[in-house]
Image (cartoon, rainbow, N blue to C red):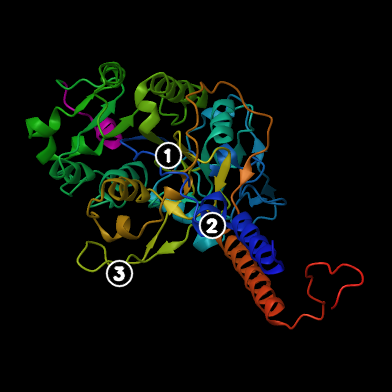
Amino acid sequence: MSRRARLIAAALIVLGGALGPRALAFVSGDSHAPAAAPQIKHIIVVVQSHHSFDNYFGTRPGVDGIPTGVCEPLSTGSRTCVKPFALSGDQSRAGLNDNARSMSQAIDGGKMDGFVTAQHNTATGTTAMGYYDSSAVGYYSALADHYTLFDHFFAATPGGSLANRLFAVAGQAGPATDGTLPSGGIAVPTIFDQLKKAGLTWKFYVQNYQPSAPADIATQDRVPLLAMPRVTSDPTMAKQIVDLEHYYQDLQTGDLPAVSYVASSIDSERPPQNPAGGEAFIRSLLNALMQNGAWSSTAVIVTYDDAGGWYDHAAPPTVTPSAPGLPLTGTPQRLGLRVPTLLISPYARAGVVDHDQADTASIPRFIEDNWHLAPLTARDATAGSLAGGLDMHQAPLPAGIVSAPSPAAAFVRPHVMVVFALYLGALALVVILVVTAIRSDSRPSNRRPIGPRVPAGSAP
């Protein structure tokens, strides 16, 4: 092999090492590059209630977690403060105030120093600084070890549970921006309308649902479709809202729809409920899926409607959607607090912490992107993508039943600018090696050519 060939081969190795085996196969002309994995055919969205990211994962290694030295003032202007602390069983059942006004006070213009004072009294306020260690939410910690955890996923609005659940299905809060159900109900387009137009199936599975009974305010809060007269009065759409037992039946009969939303009731984790009940609920859903053939083409999003008044240190950013012709265009909106969010799939990045910004409006966008549907509003059109939590080229993860935390540390996804810097560095080195090879071949050689040997005594 010539010096030039060796240098170019080295350049390809450097480039391939930086960009991965698929890029190396492409550059080298290898026709056996890994093929794309099958399209995700099922998306399941599970929305639980009232916990912040720091409340569940703030002490997990590798995440943007609770900073050292944090201490929230006990009252406005007070020098006495409360540090984050591990919750006991009784404290975990505290019901905190989480309406739009109290969350605005807690955020305090981005200072994030009003979580204690935002509550009705000091005793309750100090509880807001509590968090669960990994053993207290062991199943969720295990899921984070095996699949993708987002640590910059924000509630779409500080307006409460109903407003955020509307964002999850409609890309907007409609008339419920303050979390209050309007007297005339809600009339906004939803992702289910888009799915219906595209001929795609969907269902909304609800724990302890009784279709014959009028939906109370609490049920409408968890299932916004039940607060939409045009849905409840349409038999075709209304029959798609079913009790949770249908989820397990649909898996067994091979009738899992393209898109499923799941709402719990007694296992929603909303205080005073214990997180263990919610973990058992999620475990049941996932175990049934993993024992079914649908697992191989499914992505499950597990998230929360809002932070529930619990402390979170990350200041919610303000977003200004810009998508001409769509609702909410150009209206600045402050996001709510971060909430725990997991992406579980055979194509999830195992043990990765995804730091990219996303919010509840990213859920309808994820569905729209997967089936090439038009966006509902400017918010879901411009929301951060969840696709970074998937690797459609990796070997699918097996349908293993997750039961216990893994001792292995989570792999942290590097910041995108770090990745770009590495790629540019690799490309620069490739250029240097190739230029060196070309110059080397163009220089005149001082070495005597090697020809056939002339026997001694022969004429030269």
**Can you tell which mark lies on residue 304?**
1
Position of residue 268 measured from the top left corner of the image (x, y, whole percent): 40, 28
Q: Is residue 372 left or right of residue 452?
A: left
Three-letter code, disc 2: Ser
| Residue named by callout 3 | 330
Of marks 1 and 3, which one's residue comes earlier in the chain?
A: 1
Secondary structure, magenta segment, majority class: helix
Depicted 145 relative to depicted 286: above or below: below
Element marked by disc 3: loop
For mark 1, does the 10 Å Cα neighbourhood hold few (<14), some (14 to 19), or many (20 or more) residues? Answer: many
Three-letter code, disc 1: Tyr
Q: Is residue 146 left or right of residue 370?
A: right
Of marks 1 and 2, which one's residue comes earlier in the chain?
A: 2
Which residue is depicted at the point 18% across and 49% down? 189
Nearest the camera: 1 or 69? 1
Position of residue 369 measured from the top left corner of the image (x, y, whole percent): 31, 50
Which residue is depicted at the point 33% across and 65% down? 321
Which residue is depicted at the point 39% across and 29% down? 296
Of marks 3 and 2, which one's residue comes earlier in the chain?
A: 2
Q: Is residue 293 left or right of residue 225?
A: right
Three-letter code, disc 3: Gly
Depicted 226 relative to depicted 53: above or below: above
> What span is colored magenta in the figure?
213-222
* Quarter of image, res 408: top right
Q: Nearer the viewer, mark 1 or mark 2?
A: 2
